[in-house]
Amino acid sequence: MFTRFDAAARLAMVAALVVFLAMLWLFQGLGEGNWRFVLALRATKLASLALVAASVGVATVLFQTVAQNRILTPAIMGFDALYLLIQSLAVTGLGTIGFASLPTGAKFLLEAMLLTGVSVALFGALLGRASAETIGRTILTGMILGVMFRSGAVLLGRLLDPNEYAIVQQASFANFSRPAGGTLGWAALLALPALAVSHWLGPQLDVLGLGRDRAISLGSAHRRMVIGVLALVAVLTAVSTALVGPVAFFGLIVAGLAHALLPGARHRALLAGAALLAMALLISGQWAFERVLGLRATLSVVIEFAGGLFFLVLLLRGRVR
C-alpha cells in the first residue's frame, strides 16, 4: 500500500535529481574567462526554466482536478490559443512600434490579467456546472473554444503586414533558449504566490477531486473552488506562455508521470511531484539540446511529438478519468 512515507521518499529522490541537474547546468564547462557573466546568464535561464516547469506542471494537475479528466490540459482546452489571440489583438491595435514600446512589466501584467479574466469567465461557466455525465460535452465545448481562438488569431494575422505578423509568429512557438530576464521578476511575482496558494489548497483539492456531488455533500463550496482554481491555472499558464511561449503537451506528460510516480497520493504531494518532475525533464532536456546537440534541434518539437503520442496512448487505454 502506497503511504505518505513512500511519497516523501520519492519526492526527495526527484528533488535530489533536480539539484544535481541544476548544478550540472550551472557549472559544466565554466571556463576561467568571464565566468561571472556566464554564471549569471545561466542562472537566469535556469530560474526561467524552473519557473516555467513548475507553473506548467501545477497548472495541469489543477485543471485536471477541476475537469475530473486525466487527458485535459489548459492548452488542449484553449488557454494557449487565447493567449495568442490576445497577442494578435495587441499587435493589430497598437502596431509594431506601439507593441514594442510597451514597458515589459506593464505588458506582462496586462496579458496576465486579460488571460485570467477571460479564462475564468469562459471556463468557469463551462466547468462549474460540469458533472461526470456531461464531461464529454465539456471537452467538446472547450476544444471548440480553442479552435475559435486560434481561428481568430489566424484571421487577424492575415490582416497584418509581414513585420507585425512576424511578431505574432514569434509568440506562437515555445523557445526555451531565450533568456527571460526582462519578465522573470514579474513572472515570479505572479507565479510564486499562485504556487503557494495551490499547495495551501491541497486538502480542499482532495475533496474537489472526489467529484462535484461528493464535494458538495462534504460541505465544499464547489462553484467558488472551481473559479478560484481556474484563476490559479490562468495565472500559471500566463506566466509560462509569456516566458517561453505556448507548450501544448508538456503538462500532459508531467501530470501523467506524477500520477504514475505517486499513485493515490494527496494533492500536496501530487503538485510537488508534478513541479519537480517538470523541472527535471525541462532542465535535462534543454541541457542535452544545448550542450550535447549544440542547438541543432528544438526541444519544443520533441515535447509536442512525445506529448501527442502520450495523449493517444491515454485515449486508447481509456485513461480519461
Image: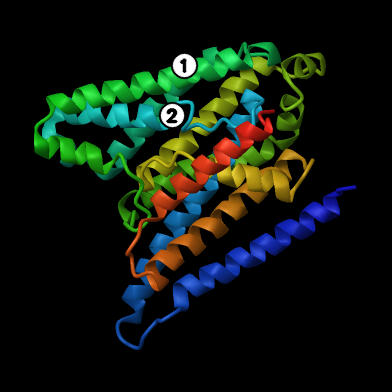
Where residue 266 sits in the image (x, y, percent)?
77, 40
At 57% from the left edge and 30% from the top edge, which residue is drawn?
Answer: 72
Quarter holding the C terminus is top right
Could you tell whether 141 is left or right of 222 in the image? left
Q: Residue furthest right?
A: 1
126, above or below 183, in the image: above
The relative height of residue 205 versus residue 185 in the rendered view (above or below) is above
Question: Tag 1: Cα neighbours inside 10 Å, few (<14), some, or many (≥20)?
Answer: few
Residue 122: assigned label: 1
The residue under the point 56% across, 37% down is: 311
Q: Which amino acid does label 1 sit on?
A: Leu
x then y, percent, for residue 116: 44, 27
The answer to which image quadrant residue 320 occupies is top right
Say whether marks 2 and 1 touch (CB < 8 Å).
Answer: no
Residue type at tag 2: Phe
Residue drawn at point x = 61 percent, y = 39 percent: 313
Front residue of 249 and 20: 249
For residue 79, which numbered disc appears in the image?
2
Furthest residue in direction bottom, as rendered: 32
What is the secondary structure assignment of the residue under circle 1?
Answer: helix
Residue 165 image position (x, y, % from top left): 16, 35
Q: Distance between the residues labelled 2 and 1?
A: 10 Å
